[in-house]
Image (cartoon, coloured by chain):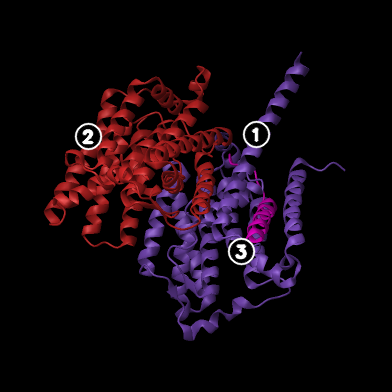
Amino acid sequence: MLALTQSTSPPGRSARIVPLALIAAAIVLLVLAARWTTPAFATVDNAFVIVRAASITGIVAIGMSFVTISGNLFALSASQLAALLAVIFALATQALGFAGGAAATLAIAAAAGIAQGLAITVIGNPIVTTLAFGAVFRGLASLVSGNGIVRIDSAAASWFGTARPLGIPTQSWAFAAIALCGWFLIRRARIGRLLVLSGANRAAAIASGLSVGAATVAAMTLLCLGSAIVAIFTVAQFAQAKADLFTGTDFDYIAAVLVGGIALRGGQGSPLQAAFGAVLIALLQNFMLLNGLSAGVRMTIVGGLVVVATCAFHLLQGRAR
Amino acid sequence: MMASPQARDLLARAALMVAVYAIFAAMLPTYTSLKGGAALLDGAVLTGLIALGVGLTMIAGEMDLSVGSMAALCGVIAVKLAPSAGPMPAILAVAAFAAGLGALQGLAIAWLRINSMIFTIGTLIGLRGITLIASGETTVLIPFDRLAMTDGFAARFLVFSPLSLTLLAAALAVGLFANRTLWGRELYAIGGGRAEARAAGVSIRRPIVLAFALSAGLAGLGGALLSLRSGSASPLGFEAVLLEAVAACLIGGVALQGGRGSIPGILCGLFALRFLISGIGGMGAPFWAQSLATGALLIIVIVVEALSRAIVARRALARRGASAT
């Protein structure tokens, strides 16, 4: 495969602010355009729909941003793992109650992240590795659920999935908290520096004694924990799980990271950009849905957006240097 | 006679294929009957055609992830085109259309010097959307009174059908192209060491455009053939074929780093995988067990291959160190 990393100079503060400012501007423009053209857009109910959708996509997209920043492009197994974890959470909640179920789900997610991180380190190609793991996760989800619907009946889970403390859905509180933690992790914590340096220049990171493998394992574990949190929220909200949950959402996560402007060769960007990217994608999907665009048209537009954003950021970040 | 390392490698992969066949042939009577053999061959056609194309892009050090969506789009177009144009012209037109789209994709990748896996994730989504639009988001069918024109696909010569003969002809043509032509050898050159190839004056653009054109063209051919044979095309079809095709290539000895791999090897990997998948299907396992088995087998194969490569490299280093002192 192509070299995943190239040497980069450390980005200045302005290089960090510009993508965030760009995407914030895009969000404001989209909101104004939607308000202008679509009466159903600017209602309180619709705002909650958007905020919740953005939170669910965003939590996984933040996890995905760690993978991209660490120089491992994308994982194509996030939606399949979320489906498997949803089924596991439902079954574990039936047996152990909400807290026990959530703890078991997070533990299994961490194990899945470590396994995938180690496999990527050995194999060297994150896309092919996670393609294979994704098939295994989806198969296991069918196996564990008996290919049926697993229902749960837990008051704690129901509160966790549907409550609105201070008028804001729990999902969105979690989204904001995770975005801030993610930002802190990348900018201030030791592990974050390891991720950034591994992604920025793999050869230099190895030469200076950093473990790139540890960075990959850490990034994949963070992504899998994000998948677990989303799986728990979704099952708690609808009180049921099945193996075909989250089908096709991988592209939303990837699109969020891409339109957030996180450099694909790694070493640059912050989880906040992925969070804003997720808000933009959720707004766009909602706007298209309210305007009656069919699933095919919506998918074509998202695909086109991914291609254009990839090429534009590639040219901006790559050729300028 | 000492066999070359490539020949020994191919022999080992052929032995794996025969071993998988033997295991299931001992348990399933369909594996040894003429009819069962024909079904096995037919089952490999779609994955096989796509694996040939994806294999070429992998040999060139790239990877085309958009093949599943391309096959679905071409299936829908072929089914819409066939009643008025006839099956053969529809298949040829659709394959040429796909190859053209693939060439454009290759041009964009070569010109932007962008990672092809990332670019084709975008086109994978976009093409699937276009397929949904083209089909009106429902399964498209060949009208009942015109179904007779697909009868030709059911013809059989011993164990061969028109479909499996197409696969074998495509494998022969792609194999000759990759091994015997200058343009084919360029794929290996840019996959093995791109900087060296560029320094030696090899064009980077031509092999990339060719690889993506062939990969899309073969995916379109596969999608059109399979959809016309069944008389219907679903816009959401062919989603799992990418995993199977990549698995066939990697089991067949195509290197993830590019530059290494052969068409006979891909065929060995393809049939080893298909014998396994059809085998567990034939023993009554549900459909999702097939993707589980494919994924697990792929992980095992690439981990073992990567570990053995690391061990060989370490041994070579140790030997060099020992001879130096």
The tag on residue A21 is 2
The foreground one among A181 and B285 is: B285
Where residue B192 appears, x then y in whole percent? 61, 39
Magenta stretch, residue numbers: B256-281
Density class for disc 1 (Cα within 10 Å; few <14, some 14-19, many ≥20) is few
Callout 1–callout 2 Cβ contact below 8 Å: no
Same chain letter for marks 3 and 1: yes
- Asked which secondary structure carries label 2, the reply is helix
**Residue B254: quadrant of the picture:** top right
**Chain of the residue where label 2 is placed in the rendered structure:** A
Q: Which chain is purple?
A: B
In the picture of the structure, the residue carrying the numbered disc 3 is B45
Where residue A106 appears, x then y in whole percent? 43, 36
Density class for disc 2 (Cα within 10 Å; few <14, some 14-19, many ≥20) is few
Where residue A10 appears, x then y in whole percent? 36, 22
Q: Is residue B98 in view from this perspective?
A: yes
Q: Which chain is red?
A: A
The foreground one among B38 and B320 is: B38
Which residue is at a point 37% across and 59% down the rendered structure image?
A: B129
Is B23 in the magenta?
no
First of labels 3, 1 by sequence position: 3
Q: Is residue B187 in view from this perspective?
A: no
| Residue A114 to residue B121: above or below | above
In the picture of the structure, the residue carrying the numbered disc 1 is B307
Q: Amino acid at mark 2?
A: Ala
- Asked which secondary structure carries label 1, the reply is helix
**Chain of the residue where label 1 is placed in the rendered structure:** B
